[in-house]
């Protein structure tokens, strides 16, 4: 009985020893594999940083304002009897736009003209009689006053009649009409907008720190997402003398030619104020920058020796950014010209990552260029 127990225990010990031995060999193999294991390389787009001649510019956003723009309204009340314009049409200065009923005023004007003519004739007769002293000086003065009063009444009614025809005060483009024929119009009721869009103003602001760097006459570039690929050039024409006490910004105004009317009242635009003079800076595509709260950085690619030969490694490098020009960004500190950097794919890298150069997946029209502002 004891012999059977002993043999059973011995068999169990041998079995356990075999299992431990097998596992030990597996662990040793895994350790050896770990010592030689390398993460597969990440495919990224690599480009060289370059030096570019730049101009200093201050960026802002603004809105377009017509050089002359008004909401047409009436000074008098009355029924609309004629609409003499089409929505969206061009109007010249003095063109009639709207006719308000003026039949009563015209009748009053004819009556006043008759009275004025009678008083004029009466004055001439009294003046003739005054020469022979038939009438007194006071009678002649009363006749003169009456003639002047009736003439003034004629002018007053003629002005009222004229105001019942609404005319364009300047040349421009009309908006959408807001009245209907037969409608009773009250003073101040909106009729239609009239905008003169050549030239136009662009109103924008800059921080007060820029006050010493800007002056009237500087060149201004304007772009808008409503007209992609198109840039407008203008001139800084006005600087508000006071700084906004709430935002501490300076309000500015630029003037632009707008011959084709592409820029419209109220349009949102991006503004770039160009400072005279140029400077050299290292520039890289904005897609290469890894933005983070603790600092902006790029991955610089270098060739290193490894157990399997030469390979490319990416190392993180912190930089200080300058101004942007289109899709390029200037580097103020931290990067030299000619360094190879990761422009696409940097988000998936860590310091020391093994990388291989791949082709850009962007179409040629989408690659960063300084002309796209």
Image (cartoon, helix red, strand yellow):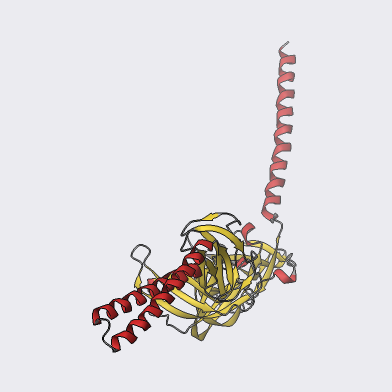
- 226 or 190, which lies in front? 190
Residue at horizontal 63 percent and vertical 72 percent from the top: 90
- 212 or 22, which lies in front? 212
Residue at horizontal 50 percent and vertical 63 percent from the top: 73
Name which quarter of the figure residue 92 lies in: bottom right
Q: Is residue 297 visible?
A: yes
Name which quarter of the figure residue 309 lies in: bottom right
Q: Image height check: is 283 above or below 174?
A: below
Rendered location of residue 115, percent (x, y): 42, 71
Q: Is residue 316 visible?
A: no
**Left or right relative to 72: residue 349:** right
**Left or right relative to 66: residue 5:** right
Rendered location of residue 42, percent (x, y): 70, 60
- 271 or 40, which lies in front? 271
Q: Image height check: is 69 above or below 220?
A: above
Q: Quadrant of the N terminus?
A: top right
Q: Report the residue that reaches farthest toward the bottom.
A: 131
Q: Report the residue that reaches farthest toward the top.
A: 1
Name which quarter of the figure residue 38 lies in: bottom right
Q: Quadrant of the C terminus?
A: bottom right
Rendered location of residue 108, percent (x, y): 47, 65
Rendered location of residue 208, percent (x, y): 38, 72
Residue at horizontal 57 percent and vertical 80 percent from the top: 257
How many numbered marks appear?
Answer: 0
**Left or right relative to 269: residue 208:** left
């Amino acid at each position: 009985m004891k012999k059977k127990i002993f043999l059973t225990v011995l068999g169990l010990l041998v079995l356990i020893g075999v299992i431990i031995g097998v596992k030990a060999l597996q662990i040793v193999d895994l350790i050896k594999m770990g010592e030689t294991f390398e993460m597969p390389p990440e495919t990224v787009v690599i480009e060289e940083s370059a030096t570019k001649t730049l101009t200093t510019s201050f960026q802002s956003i603004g809105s377009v304002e017509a050089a002359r723009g008004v909401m047409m309204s009436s000074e008098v009340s009355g029924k609309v009897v004629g609409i003499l314009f089409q929505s969206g049409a061009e109007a010249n200065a003095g063109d009639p736009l709207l006719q308000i009923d003026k039949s009563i005023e015209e009748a009053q004007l004819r009556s006043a003209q008759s009275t004025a003519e009678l008083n004029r004739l009466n004055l001439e007769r009294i003046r003739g009689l005054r020469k022979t002293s038939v009438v007194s000086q006071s009678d002649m003065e009363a006749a003169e006053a009456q003639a002047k009063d009736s003439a003034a009444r004629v002018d007053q009614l003629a002005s009222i009649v004229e105001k019942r025809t609404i005319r364009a005060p300047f040349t421009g483009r009309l908006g959408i009409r807001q009245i209907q024929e037969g409608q009773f119009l009250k003073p101040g009721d909106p009729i239609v907008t009239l905008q003169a869009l050549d030239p136009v103003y662009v109103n924008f602001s800059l921080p007060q720190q820029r006050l010493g760097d800007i002056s009237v006459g500087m060149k201004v570039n304007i772009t808008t997402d409503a007209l992609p690929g198109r840039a407008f050039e203008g001139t800084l024409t006005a600087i508000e003398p006071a700084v906004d006490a709430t935002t501490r910004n300076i309000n500015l105004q630029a003037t632009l030619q707008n011959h084709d009317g592409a820029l419209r009242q109220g349009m949102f635009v991006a503004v770039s104020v160009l400072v005279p003079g140029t400077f050299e800076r290292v520039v890289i595509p904005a897609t290469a920058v890894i933005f983070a709260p603790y600092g902006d950085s790029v991955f610089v690619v270098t060739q290193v020796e490894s157990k399997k030969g030469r390979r490319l490694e990416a190392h993180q490098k912190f930089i200080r950014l300058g101004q942007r020009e289109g899709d390029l960004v200037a580097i103020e500190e931290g990067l030299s010209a000619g360094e190879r950097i990761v422009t696409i794919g940097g988000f998936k890298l860590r310091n020391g990552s093994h990388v291989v150069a791949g082709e850009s997946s962007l179409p040629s029209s989408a690659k960063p260029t300084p002309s796209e502002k």
